[in-house]
Amino acid sequence: MPRPLVLHPDRLFPADPDIRAIARELYGSVERLPIVSPHGHTDPSWFAENAAFGNAAELLLLPDHYIFRMLYSQGVPLEQLGIGDREADPREAWRLFAERYHLFRGTPSRLWLDWVFAEAFGIDVRLDGGTSDFYYDTITEALTTDPFRPRALFERYGIEVIATTESPLDTLEHHAAIRDSNWAGRVVTAYRPDPVVDPEFEGFRDNLARFSQLTGEDCLSWQGYLAAHRKRRAFFASMGATSTDHGHPTSSTADLCEAEAEALFRKVSTGAFVPAEAELFRAQMLTEMAAMSLDDGLVMQIHPGSLRNHNARLFEGFGRDKGADIPTCTDYVHALKPLLDRFGNERDLSLILFTLDESTYSRELAPLAGHYPCLKLGPAWWFHDSPEGMRRFRRMTTETAGFYNTVGFNDDTRAFLSIPARHDVARRIDCGFLAELVAEHRLEDWEAAELAQELAYGLVKRAYRL
Amino acid sequence: MPRPLVLHPDRLFPADPDIRAIARELYGSVERLPIVSPHGHTDPSWFAENAAFGNAAELLLLPDHYIFRMLYSQGVPLEQLGIGDREADPREAWRLFAERYHLFRGTPSRLWLDWVFAEAFGIDVRLDGGTSDFYYDTITEALTTDPFRPRALFERYGIEVIATTESPLDTLEHHAAIRDSNWAGRVVTAYRPDPVVDPEFEGFRDNLARFSQLTGEDCLSWQGYLAAHRKRRAFFASMGATSTDHGHPTSSTADLCEAEAEALFRKVSTGAFVPAEAELFRAQMLTEMAAMSLDDGLVMQIHPGSLRNHNARLFEGFGRDKGADIPTCTDYVHALKPLLDRFGNERDLSLILFTLDESTYSRELAPLAGHYPCLKLGPAWWFHDSPEGMRRFRRMTTETAGFYNTVGFNDDTRAFLSIPARHDVARRIDCGFLAELVAEHRLEDWEAAELAQELAYGLVKRAYRL
Amino acid sequence: MPRPLVLHPDRLFPADPDIRAIARELYGSVERLPIVSPHGHTDPSWFAENAAFGNAAELLLLPDHYIFRMLYSQGVPLEQLGIGDREADPREAWRLFAERYHLFRGTPSRLWLDWVFAEAFGIDVRLDGGTSDFYYDTITEALTTDPFRPRALFERYGIEVIATTESPLDTLEHHAAIRDSNWAGRVVTAYRPDPVVDPEFEGFRDNLARFSQLTGEDCLSWQGYLAAHRKRRAFFASMGATSTDHGHPTSSTADLCEAEAEALFRKVSTGAFVPAEAELFRAQMLTEMAAMSLDDGLVMQIHPGSLRNHNARLFEGFGRDKGADIPTCTDYVHALKPLLDRFGNERDLSLILFTLDESTYSRELAPLAGHYPCLKLGPAWWFHDSPEGMRRFRRMTTETAGFYNTVGFNDDTRAFLSIPARHDVARRIDCGFLAELVAEHRLEDWEAAELAQELAYGLVKRAYRL
């Protein structure tokens, strides 16, 4: 007998009956608000081509490193999941996952997936070894139908706007195709220059050559390189971008004089650099990007503190983004000072900070964002975009930075169907947090109602200029 | 229609009805206890001269960097608030604040201010743009009356003793005037030697010259300098001081031999030093101060970990204490070892540690204070003297250090009327925490009642020798 | 009138009635499960000789640094407790403790001790100065009876298996005696090589000489030294060991080539080394131990981050383990990389990580254990094996690592009677945490029931291969 799968209407609300009643009412007022997704990693070709997704494993398993990192940690080889091995049978990959679905108890993946199973596919039994084939068939069959094509799902879940993330080397042809089609869905890009900003990125020098080609600038000269960024940012903005995104190992910034910057660029662009110089160049580029943002109005996002590709053998065998990026201790106070000394008081600059190091929430990030006009705090991110993680974020930032120096929710995923699931979790957790404040008489009910709207919709629209 | 302002009698108690009932009863037993304020920044001239405060903005806005840092973070120029611009209309400054009062939702400033508005001024509508003038007029008018003069407020709120904080260069004339008046209020000073201990303090060398003048010692010689401290500490003690206060960037201590210390002093006193030497001198001075405390009995407070004046342009334009001090990662275990190796086992030394880095609560501070006889933990401080901050402090320190290695509450403010408001928040939060322990049967009710008295009154009296 | 001592059946469950009801039911299903104690510091001679414990102070006070560190922090000299002074009257030592029992309010020691008093000795009044003699007499008298001998207590509390911790230099004669007796109790050892792995351990070079004697290998040659470890590990395994334990100051690992390792060993074994070389040697030895674990199947435990013997004078006067070990900031991400680069993907290696730095739970440990097949997370440890500490552990690790990358509970104590008390606290807290997840509909009730069994019994059996 399979176990029933039911999404409880009060899920994720605090258990206390008074708080729960308040949370339920707040949530009712924001549950159906449009989704604004200012930062994520969906593939624009989905919306350009509107082709059907292939099968359950391809849709839900392969793009989701939250899932396969857990399976890998418990001894499942990635090849058997179909990663790096196109011969693997997707039904059998799905079965490996289904048989181990208990591993996800207590994790946000479990919450998101159950939402997708029940809400998107109407499945009413729980996933386990016994229901694996039923799941695989149900989902795979649904995917052949029109309501499960990307554009239909986009509309079904009330996505008002979604941002993808592209390198400056991307031609944005899919975005052009979307724009040129008759479809009303708003899919914008974001400018993520890591491949041409990080001297330690794979193929950096080739990337500079391609950057020259695309822009007609001499990207081996410092001025040409900066001009190329300006041109490319303008092109991205013309394709809807309102933001840039910077995934550096640290949040280091620098403010070198012209001659120093030029000399440093010569080193990194010729490959004659040591790691500290690569770090300094990334640091300098954050300040250069801030200068450009002041000119062109693009909102700047800094996502530091992940040691990428920690597992050397896995990286050799399978490449990037395989669940082996590990957070590290991150400093903001000293690291951001050069940039802030130059631009910190600019009210027209908008710089959104993220962290994977929760010890910085109350110590560094909230004090910084609660003072500098240019700074705002991105939401609980990546390993922390979970019920407990989001609660810690609110508890540790609100008292110093308030709600209005935060920017709403980011789903930050390439797992398309988890987007509405993630926004639902965020709205529930935020409403529960507000309900606690009301129940403790730290906030009036009408204020909580205003804030619920802001956290679900208003703040993100304004912060990202969407 | 303005929104009503009512302070709910159960505010800040946990929502669970059983816990709340216990908290309410505990709070009832401590609500009216006298206020002991062992550490703060009120101006002694208020109590010496007992002059009326000027207007709403002057009383509530200008002295409170919690308020203007938030307004600044949302784009309000400090000049328009009357900071660094005496021409600014205080009524208009107040309006800028009133119109943005929603920014403080979820912050402790909101709790303190509502208390001041309702409890001190009897206002029963909420602050916003529409009630701005009503607030400004009501408060400003009240301030012209005798019940709102400093001494009357001191008595009205049951302040048993308050400590101000002065530099060794201060003549303490206001304290003398208070002592010489007939007034029964107890206002004591505290010895904060940063201006003559920190070689990087503005005007350090001039300060040493003035230190010589005041004490008749040669403060350009190491022995004369130490003798000056001893004399000045004795003078402060004669004016009621029971404590010293040390606001260093880090908690570094050192225990140099006589010759090394003297050589180091020569460098810093002649200005021929590098930053590491300034740091080492501050470190050495903490140990020297501990030695003097063993002699004269002054309790020692160490408040490390704030990177002062992080915003370079703001500091140039407006000076210190403008809301731009940002906490940093702080080490205690290695930093305090030199001092503790020398004095850690002294039962007659009392050294109170504060932090802005909450990650040290359970990792370093509670283990240190739960072992060394000389150490106690100061309460949740500055950015953390808030409901969630105080709860984290208790949850993260009590299990290792217990309650009896803590020292009650510090308000640490120059916003006079927020003092009773802050003590009220602290008492409510502590009673709520105790109530949780009782409800989970981790503590008996009669023990919680004893502890509530200790946390509100007993511990601070004993720890600060007041 | 003495105060009554009663252990409330709902103690440590969350106060909310719905959550509490769920917790109570979960707890009921695991309360009586056997105790598996895979890591601790009980004395194997207790079980070998089965002699009666001497008196209340000897049983409960002297082996428990949680108790005397708190008393010391409040001014009680260790000598008066009978530490380092065999002349001290144990009854008077007990009285010093009894009169100060209020200091332990809010600490886990209080919970454990009350359990021991009420459950093990049937005492029904609270400990204080007035009941001190009654306690001392009751406990001391009970200890003369057979039901309070070590083996009887072992059986009474349902201990299925307990691991002690021994140095490679230990002859394990007590373990041999236990094995050779008719007693059915399972007492195993664990291999803790710090005395022969840490060049800075007291008597390191003498230890190497003894290591040679015991093994017949030349422990002053690198190959002989490694061979000695292999032999000794095999001997420990033959005496029941299933694990090794490594209490290094940091979690640094290294992977030197053969020649480098040999050269380094020459330095440390001849005493011609600097501190960084000692650190590198310890780091290299973790990787060597991992290699041996892959061969012999012993589970590896790494317990880093304690700065041992922080109080220099106390260490001189009283030696190790006197409550003066203080946690420090600990890095895992960079420190473990050399070992993980070599063995991280081995599914047959089991490496259990502990921490005293809670900021690493969500930032480093859960992401590492949620990815690498060889890693698991040890439970909240030492200063953190307390109600709040355990809750933080679950809240900060579960969402990223899940439950199945954790290993159940360790009591880690030499205070024998606190073992069942500690397991009881852990089971109650875990059931309370699961109950919260159920009440918030993040987990089904039947899943929580399965997990309660796993957290109390299943995980530890499998993780430690017991």
Image (cartoon, coloured by chain):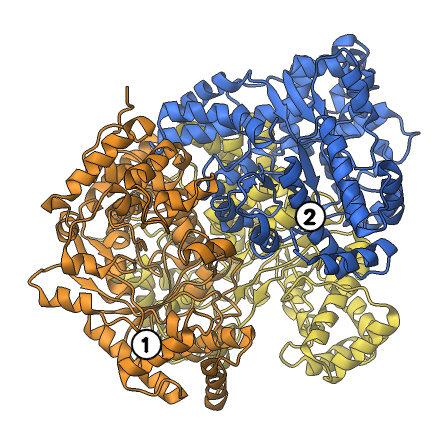
Chain colours: A blue, B orange, C yellow
Check whether the beta carbons of the residues at disc 2 and disc 1 lie within 8 A of each other. Answer: no
- Chain ID at mark 2: A
Relative depth, front residue between A229 and C127? A229
Residue A288 is tagged as 2
The residue type indicated by label 2 comes to: Glu
> Residue C145's x, y, as percent?
42, 60
Q: Residue at x 76, y 29 (%)?
A: A97
> Residue C132's x, y, as percent?
29, 62
Q: Residue furthest right?
A: A87
| Left or right for B314, reference A124 | left
Q: Does residue C147 show up? A: no
Q: Up-down: is B437 above or below A6?
A: below
- Mark 2 surroundings: few (<14), some (14-19) or many (≥20) residues within 10 A: some
Q: CA distance from mark 2 to mark 1?
A: 51 Å
Q: Up-down: is C328 above or below B154?
A: below
Tell me the element at label 2: helix
Q: Up-down: is B118 above or below A95?
A: below
- Mark 1 surroundings: few (<14), some (14-19) or many (≥20) residues within 10 A: many
Q: Identify the residue position indicated by label 1 in the image.
A: B293
Q: Residue at x 69, y 31 (%)?
A: A40
Q: Does residue A445 show up? A: yes
The residue type indicated by label 1 comes to: Ser
* Quadrant of the drawing holding the N terminus of chain B: top left
Tell me the element at label 1: helix
Query: Could you say which quadrant of the image residue A321 lies in?
Result: top right
Q: Residue furthest front?
A: B87
Do the residues at discs 2 and 1 belong to one chain?
A: no
